[in-house]
Image (cartoon, helix red, strand yellow):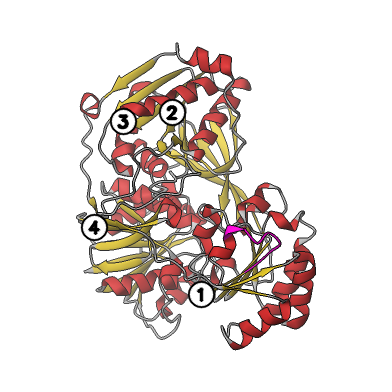
């Protein structure tokens, strides 16, 4: 068996989710190759080659693959992937965008967001917002799979010495073009990779009040997230949303502030190691999953917490 | 231009689902069923395009059991012009659904196909991308803004780090994210009118599509439950527990 892992990157740096995806590949077993598709991705390819356990890095460096437009990248992955037993990508917005297109081109069903590997052809994945776990077996000649990063501990970013090979195939469908992007800038750790996450919900009342969470987060070295209610109310941008349709996080410590605990929010954070809930409503469902619950006014509790940690 | 919208009948998002005792799936007997929330957003977007004069006809399609006609009637009440049900009682995979939708696209020749980004039952997030692959069209997934101009559509997408805008040649596939729009409610007169709108019923056989699958669900289990925690009385006690008991700060 040889497994092809699609590297997650922004053109400049390899994203940590790649390490979790390689970890899932290692559980399946067999040789692991990593594909880096993009433009000017030399540094990413170098980082991919250093990942522990990676045998070979394939680099498709071409203008057609800049911004990883799925119309161009999917045919490349499908063409290269034919010779592999498995194709894996992280269940990031990129992975979710590209991989189903690859699966359809290969005429196989995809298995989305696996959280465990049972055997080389059998995997577990959450359905119904994590309220049920399905065990799914694939009979496809090439198994196409996205990996939920929180289900797998990352492999070491260093220690590997993979062969790097250039891929010259160019697929340019000409059906799509990149116009622009607006990326949130933050000095705080990335939500999905942070050891501590502080999240706010509707109880924050407005966007300005998130400053209390930012102050606490900076003291803890934490990332800041939000519930869908807080995002829908316009308090904070959508890239901060934790939940079924937002980001899935599983930090060492998750502090939910003014969050009631809707099913779809719990789906995004209930695998956190320790959960703290601060809410003035003692009936809030978030307390049912919290290890430590504090029934208090968040506007008093959060500044006090910031002082004491 | 003609817009095709795909909708799925799923368990209502307010229902707390239970896994069946024999682990064969979740119990859907006597459970409230609704249109998938992302599909409602897809229907709303199509209706808005029609109100702006961009879309001339909205065809709504569902793949599912006879009862999915309820969701199609809802879409007709919201503003779709006619409906197609591809009737199947099987538990179809995303690829099978995408193949059936491809056959409908071949038949209807829409300029734009709008789908929800994922269904809240299977949580697959695959069908739109697969339909794009099968048709060879460009795809604008996880859309938060859709603007048609001439023979292209600009789609702003919700991505991990923020937002990205791509331009796609028409015909194209768009999948909706939560903040694309806020769906309206159907008015009673429109619900009455929807009963008279055309609804065509097809079968996978009639469309010449095989729905064979390479995936097999072996079992469905309830997730591991978190053990109940404790309530602390003060912030000081919380900090003490986090430092000395949980050892996470």
* Viewer-side residue, A103 vs A137: A137
Where residue A55 sits in the image (x, y, percent)? 31, 77
Where residue B224 sits in the image (x, y, percent)? 39, 66
Which secondary structure lies at badge 2? helix
Q: Which residue is mark 4?
A: A137
Which is more N-terminal, label 1 or label 4? Answer: 4
Instruction: Reply yes or no: does residue A25 show up in magenta.
Output: no
Which secondary structure lies at badge 3? loop
Respond whether the residues carrying marks 1 and 3 are from the same subunit: no
State how many labels appear. Answer: 4
Q: CA distance from mark 1 to mark 3?
A: 41 Å
Badge 2 vs badge 4, beta-carbon distance below 8 Å? no
Where residue A165 sits in the image (x, y, percent)? 35, 70
Q: Which residue is mark 2?
A: B71
Please give the range of residues in magenta: A277-285
Residue A53's disc number: none
* Viewer-side residue, A292 vs A201: A292
Q: Residues within 10 Å of mark 3 (few under 14, many from 20)?
A: some
Q: Which residue is mark 1?
A: A273
Residue A10 in view here: no
Query: Is the N terminus of chain A in the top left, top right, bottom left or bottom right quadrant?
Result: bottom left
Q: Is residue A129 left or right of residue A281?
A: left
Which callout, 4 or 1, points to the residue nearer the camera?
1
Q: Which residue is mark 3?
A: B65
Mark 3 falls within which chain? Answer: B
Q: Residues within 10 Å of mark 2 (few under 14, many from 20)?
A: many
Where residue A230 sits in the image (x, y, percent)? 67, 53
Residue A80, above or below A195? above
Which secondary structure lies at badge 1? loop
Figure quadrant of residue B89: top left
Which callout, 2 or 4, points to the residue nearer the camera?
2
Residue B163, above or below B114? below
């Amino acid at each position: 068996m040889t497994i092809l892992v699609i590297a997650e990157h922004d053109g400049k740096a390899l994203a940590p989710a790649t390490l979790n995806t390689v970890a899932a590949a290692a559980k399946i077993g067999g040789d692991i190759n990593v594909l880096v598709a993009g433009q000017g991705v030399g540094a990413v390819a170098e980082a991919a080659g250093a990942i522990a356990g990676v045998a070979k890095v394939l680099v498709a460096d071409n203008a057609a693959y800049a911004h990883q437009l799925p119309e161009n990248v999917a045919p490349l992955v499908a063409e290269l992937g034919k010779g592999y037993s498995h194709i894996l990508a992280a269940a990031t917005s990129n992975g979710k965008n590209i991989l189903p297109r690859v699966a359809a081109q290969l005429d196989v069903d995809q298995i989305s967001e696996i959280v465990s590997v049972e055997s080389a052809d059998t995997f577990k994945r959450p359905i119904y917002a994590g309220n049920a776990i399905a065990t799914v077996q694939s009979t496809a000649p090439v198994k196409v799979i996205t990996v939920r990063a929180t289900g797998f501990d990352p492999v070491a970013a260093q220690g590997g010495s993979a062969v790097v090979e250039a891929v010259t195939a160019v697929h340019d469908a000409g059906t799509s073009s990149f116009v622009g992007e607006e990326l949130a800038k933050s000095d705080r750790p990335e939500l999905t990779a942070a050891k501590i996450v502080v999240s706010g919900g509707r109880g924050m009342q407005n966007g300005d009040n998130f400053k209390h969470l930012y102050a606490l987060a900076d003291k803890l070295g934490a990332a800041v997230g939000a519930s869908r209610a807080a995002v829908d109310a316009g308090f904070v941008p959508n890239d901060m949303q934790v939940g079924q349709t937002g980001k899935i996080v599983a930090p060492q410590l998750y502090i939910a502030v003014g969050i009631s605990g809707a099913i779809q929010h719990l789906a995004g954070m209930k695998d956190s190691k320790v959960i703290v809930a601060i809410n003035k409503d003692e009936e809030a469902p978030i307390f049912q999953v919290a290890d430590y619950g504090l029934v208090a006014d968040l506007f008093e509790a959060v500044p006090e917490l910031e002082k004491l940690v | 231009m003609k817009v095709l919208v795909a909708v799925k009948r799923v368990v209502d998002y307010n229902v707390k689902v239970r896994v069946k005792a024999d682990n064969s799936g979740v119990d859907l007997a006597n459970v409230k069923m609704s249109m998938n929330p992302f599909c409602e957003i897809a229907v709303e977007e199509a209706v808005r395009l029609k109100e702006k004069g961009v879309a001339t006809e909205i065809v709504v399609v569902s793949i599912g059991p006879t009862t999915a006609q309820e969701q199609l009637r809802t879409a007709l009440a919201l503003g779709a012009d006619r409906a197609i049900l591809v009737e199947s009682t099987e538990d179809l995979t995303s690829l099978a659904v995408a193949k059936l939708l491809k056959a409908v696209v071949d038949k209807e020749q829409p300029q734009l196909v709008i789908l929800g980004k994922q269904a809240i039952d299977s949580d697959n997030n695959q069908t739109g991308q697969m339909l794009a692959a099968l048709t060879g069209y460009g795809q604008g997934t996880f859309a938060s803004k859709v603007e048609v101009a001439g023979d292209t559509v600009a789609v702003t997408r919700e991505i991990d780090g923020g937002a990205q805008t791509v331009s796609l040649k028409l015909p194209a596939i768009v999948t909706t994210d939560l903040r694309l729009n806020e769906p309206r409610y159907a008015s009673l007169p429109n619900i009455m009118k929807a009963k008279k709108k055309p609804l065509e019923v097809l079968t996978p056989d009639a469309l010449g599509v095989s729905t064979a699958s390479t995936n097999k669900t072996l079992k469905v289990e309830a997730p591991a439950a978190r053990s109940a925690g404790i309530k602390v009385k003060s912030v000081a006690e919380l900090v003490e527990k986090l430092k000395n008991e949980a050892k996470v700060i």
